Image (cartoon, helix red, strand yellow):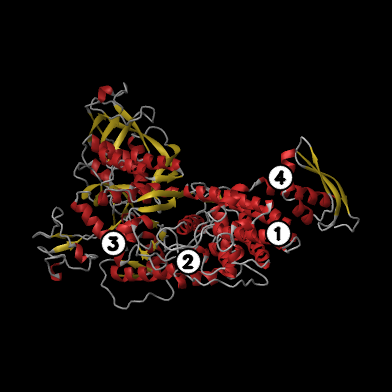
């Protein structure tokens, strides 16, 4: 057992150094422990990071900042507990744990919550109203909501986010997270904005960030661009429409499409180069139905001969495949769908007057849905639609938070190079992933598969209001047009800035939006562009270089496996571009929480469990036990049965500890703390300590390999052996029935085991362990050192762990005989025979006296046999039945 010492390698028990008197409550209970110790830990700085340190002594954690605009669910308790268990182990193992927590209050989720909560919507052109307060009761109809300026809207976002974060912090404190509450941050606060803007400027200076006008996935509801990592496919009903294009000799070429409304945006037909049906058409042109536009027939290997008619219509733009064909075949751009999801009202230049123009007038200004209906009706009338549309189910791109299919819209956006268009950079990022330890290891393939599947750079601009603004202004020429090639940038010292309200360097405010003056970049950074910098934000990059040097690269990134493609990958991208390194050395991927039907919990499905309910019902230690029982990466079913087991374990720890301390043991009874190992002379006590030493070693190995669930299993299994077998076996001797020497031996074993078990259990059930620790020890168990076996290693080595196993098995045999006879367990055994092989009997003799006392047995005969241990010929005292 290790001692509490000071220094860089062993944590100091900072709360107190005065030995504690043993004071055990009459009725130990779990109720109230969360409030009691959460406040005490914070007041005493139990989990505070010590800045007077060096990098080798630090274990830093890049904790996921929860979305503060939502509500916590049981999945948060699951994953954050797993991280906390690791943090607590590292702290007790001697590391100076840097464990901050951020709140992700940046971006679209906060905007939506503020809109609905206050009943307001933002129009950037509205003037700022100082002291604005939203209506007390928001209007039910969105059309009746207050319309406010961007600055007023941002103020409301910040106000509500702060209130939400208070609720989250209380819940996490109740759960027992050992984060350093003096080191919290918000992804939208001044510090985060500065770091995010500084990183963008450095990437811009290095050529890693750039602006381009290009096809962009666009959500027409939220009016914002969407990155590839935010896409999800959803199965939707659709229909194949077989449509004829016209050859100059009067022949027809049939294509099949689910997007007939995009006919006026058609730029080519494409077939596979090996498709003999269309090889004679490559290099020729055909004319589109209704709109009579001449388009080329081209060859491309992405075309699928077995899909539809084998030849596809390329439009600008129907989907991302269209974008790939358009780019690689250098096709013209004929974009018609705007940011509002409607077809442009003006007649396109490539559509001629007359019938084609009349046909376009039928779709001008319409939504995609209405335009499709109109085009199908016109194709039917013209005879260019062959047969009835064939209904299908097919995957359609959606923004992960959106309700309508995405469109591809041409727009000017900011990008960060991520290897999607650069094979060398892609390989560098794959290699960075291989420099990290992945827990579990198979998760690395998901990271590599994502990188290998990228088809473009990371789009980081969003057309929203609440977010980190791009720190960019543009000069306006004499006509008032922006010069995007020569942006105006702030100095690093000026950050953070808001170009919408701050004046561009070298200009006056009167020149804003005036010819010859300047304009602000209207967009904000994608929330992932800031969240990708959580290691830099937390460690003080660009602000506190001394802290940054001591904590970066970080030691651990814990997160869900479903956001490897977004948060994990984007963070690796930024660390590579900004520092040429990995952002952390270990990544721990937690699984999903499933409902009892093995379906992922989500708010949209209505199967989410609220954390407050289960915390009140079972207590934090019980919930933590359930979470820590699951391996990293494993999807786990929500199981209150496991919580009941965890609660039973915590209560048993209180009661077993009360028994041990009731024997009169103190801190001085612990081997190595004032009691020499030579005191332990009993074989059964030596066996207990041998098993304990084995558990310490194996659980420590498991923790080092991030297998905390395995460690918990080992510790818990030993604990039940200790309480159900050892404690029952030694009660008589512990009370002094066999003399002071025998009592001293058992007291040392009991005290040492309790001391060690409290330390072993501390990462998992912090409240019950802290409560017991307070009964007989000074300070906090969570600032005590992780147990080692120095105090009794030699003694344990001499002990035979199987002695306890064999004697416990024999005791179970005696108990079983009494149960089968339906008598009480305290009923005396007049005689019994125990049969076993010679080596087993030899072990049994080491605890025979304790066995007889525990089983209330007067005479036990040991008989050698070839089979397994068996208890027979039990003669019980004649007494009443149980």
Q: Residue furthest bottom?
A: 131
Q: Residues within 10 Å of mark 4 (few under 14, many from 20)?
A: many
Q: Residues within 10 Å of mark 1 (few under 14, many from 20)?
A: some
**What is the C-alpha distance between the residues marked 2 and 3?**
26 Å
Foreground disc of the pair 4, 3? 4
Q: Earlier in the sequence, mark 1 or mark 4?
A: 1
Give the x, y percent position of residue 251.
28, 25
The reply to whether the C-beta atoms of the residues labelled 1 and 2 are less than 8 Å apart is: no
Q: Residues within 10 Å of mark 3 (few under 14, many from 20)?
A: few
Q: Earlier in the sequence, mark 3 or mark 1?
A: 3
Give the x, y percent position of residue 640.
61, 56
Q: Quadrant of the C terminus?
A: bottom right
**What is the C-alpha distance between the residues marked 1 and 4?**
18 Å
**What is the C-alpha distance between the residues marked 1 and 2?**
33 Å
**What is the C-alpha distance between the residues marked 2 and 4?**
40 Å
Foreground disc of the pair 3, 1? 1
Provide the residue designation for mark 1: 742
Provide the residue designation for mark 2: 13
Q: Of residues 43 and 319, which is closer to you in this image?
A: 43
Q: Earlier in the sequence, mark 2 or mark 3?
A: 2
Secondary structure, mark 4, is helix
The answer to whether any part of residue 47 appears in the image is yes
Provide the residue designation for mark 4: 843
Q: Of residues 599 and 114, which is closer to you in this image?
A: 599
Provide the residue designation for mark 3: 546
Foreground disc of the pair 1, 4? 1
Q: Is residue 414 above or below residue 315?
A: below
């Amino acid at each position: 057992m290790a001692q509490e010492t000071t220094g860089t390698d062993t944590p100091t028990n900072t709360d107190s150094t005065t030995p504690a008197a043993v004071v055990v409550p009459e009725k130990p209970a779990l109720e109230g422990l969360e409030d009691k110790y959460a406040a005490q830990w914070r007041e005493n700085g139990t989990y505070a990071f010590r800045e007077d340190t060096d990098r080798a002594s630090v274990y830093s954690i890049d904790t996921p900042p929860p979305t503060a605009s939502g509500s916590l669910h049981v999945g948060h308790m699951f994953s954050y507990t797993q991280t906390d268990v690791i943090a607590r182990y590292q702290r007790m193992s001697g590391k100076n744990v840097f464990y901050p927590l951020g709140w992700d209050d940046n971006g679209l989720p906060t905007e939506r919550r503020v809109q609905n909560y206050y009943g307001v919507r933002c129009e950037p052109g509205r003037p700022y109203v100082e002291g604005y307060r939203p209506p007390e009761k928001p209007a039910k109809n969105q059309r009746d909501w207050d319309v406010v300026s961007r600055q007023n809207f941002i103020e409301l976002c910040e106000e509500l986010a702060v209130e939400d974060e208070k609720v989250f912090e209380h819940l996490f404190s109740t759960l027992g997270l050992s984060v350093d509450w003096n080191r919290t941050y918000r992804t939208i606060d001044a510090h985060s904005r500065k770091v995010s803007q500084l990183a963008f400027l450095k990437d811009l200076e290095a050529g890693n960030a750039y602006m381009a006008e290009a096809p962009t996935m666009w959500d027409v509801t939220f009016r914002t661009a969407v990155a590839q990592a935010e896409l999800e496919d959803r199965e939707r009903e659709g229909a194949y429409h077989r449509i004829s294009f016209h050859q100059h000799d009067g022949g027809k070429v049939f294509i099949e499409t689910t997007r007939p409304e995009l006919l006026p945006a058609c730029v080519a037909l494409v077939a596979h180069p090996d498709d003999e049906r269309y090889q004679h058409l490559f290099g020729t042109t055909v004319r589109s139905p209704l709109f009579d536009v001449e388009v080329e027939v081209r060859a491309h290997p992405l075309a699928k001969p077995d899909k539809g008619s084998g030849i596809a219509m390329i439009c600008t733009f129907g989907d991302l495949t269209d974008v790939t064909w358009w780019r690689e075949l250098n096709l013209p751009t004929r974009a018609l769908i705007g940011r509002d999801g409607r077809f442009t009202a003006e007649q396109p230049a490539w559509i001629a007057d007359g019938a084609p123009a009349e046909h376009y007038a039928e779709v001008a200004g319409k939504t995609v849905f209405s335009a499709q209906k109109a085009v199908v009706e016109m194709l039917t009338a013209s005879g260019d639609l062959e047969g009835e549309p064939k209904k299908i189910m097919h995957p359609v791109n959606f923004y992960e938070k959106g309700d309508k299919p995405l469109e591809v819209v041409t727009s000017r956006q900011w990008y960060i190079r991520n290897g999607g268009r650069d094979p060398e950079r892609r390989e560098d990022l794959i290699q960075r992933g291989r420099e990290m330890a992945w827990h579990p290891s198979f998760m690395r393939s998901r990271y590599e598969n994502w990188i290998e599947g990228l088809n473009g750079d990371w789009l980081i601009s969003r057309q929203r209001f609440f977010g980190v603004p791009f720190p960019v202004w543009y000069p306006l020429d004499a006509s008032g047009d922006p010069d995007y090639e020569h942006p105006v940038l702030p100095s690093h010292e000026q950050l953070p800035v808001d170009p919408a309200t701050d004046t561009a360097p070298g200009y006056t405010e009167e020149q804003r939006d005036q010819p010859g003056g300047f304009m602000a970049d209207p967009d904000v950074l994608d929330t992932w562009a800031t969240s990708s910098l959580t290691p830099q934000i937390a460690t003080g990059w660009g602000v506190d270089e001394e802290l940054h040097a001591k904590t970066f690269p970080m030691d651990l990134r814990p997160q869900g496996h479903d956001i490897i493609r977004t948060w994990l990958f984007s963070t690796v991208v930024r660390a590579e571009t900004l520092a040429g390194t990995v952002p952390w050395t270990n990544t721990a991927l937690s699984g999903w929480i499933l409902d009892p039907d093995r379906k992922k919990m989500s708010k949209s499905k209505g199967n989410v469990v609220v954390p407050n309910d289960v915390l009140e019902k079972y207590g934090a230690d019980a919930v933590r036990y359930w979470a820590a029982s699951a391996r990293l990466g494993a999807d786990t079913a929500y199981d209150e049965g496991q919580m009941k087991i965890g609660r039973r374990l915590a209560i048993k720890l209180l009661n077993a500890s009360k028994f041990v301390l009731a024997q009169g043991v103190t801190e001085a009874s612990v081997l190595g703390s004032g009691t020499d190992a030579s005191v332990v002379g009993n074989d059964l006590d030596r066996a207990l300590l041998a098993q304990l030493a084995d558990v310490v070693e194996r659980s420590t190995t498991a923790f080092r390999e991030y297998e905390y669930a395995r460690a918990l299993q080992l510790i818990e299994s030993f604990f039940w052996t200790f309480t159900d077998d050892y404690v029952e076996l030694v009660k008589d001797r512990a009370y002094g029935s066999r003399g002071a020497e025998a009592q001293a031996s058992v007291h040392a074993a009991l005290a040492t085991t309790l001391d060690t078990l409290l330390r072993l259990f501390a990462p998992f059930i912090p409240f019950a362990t802290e409560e017991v620790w307070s009964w007989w020890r000074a300070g906090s168990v969570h600032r005590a050192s992780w147990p080692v076996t120095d105090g009794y290693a030699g003694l344990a080595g001499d002990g035979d762990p199987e002695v306890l196993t064999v004697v416990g098995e024999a005791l179970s045999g005696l108990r079983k005989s009494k149960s089968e006879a339906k008598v009480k367990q305290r009923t005396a055994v007049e005689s019994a025979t125990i049969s076993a092989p010679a080596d087993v009997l030899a072990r049994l003799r080491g605890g025979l006296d304790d066995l007889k006392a525990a089983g209330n047995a007067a005479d036990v005969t040991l008989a050698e046999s070839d089979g397994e241990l068996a208890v027979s010929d039990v003669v019980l005292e004649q007494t009443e039945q149980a």
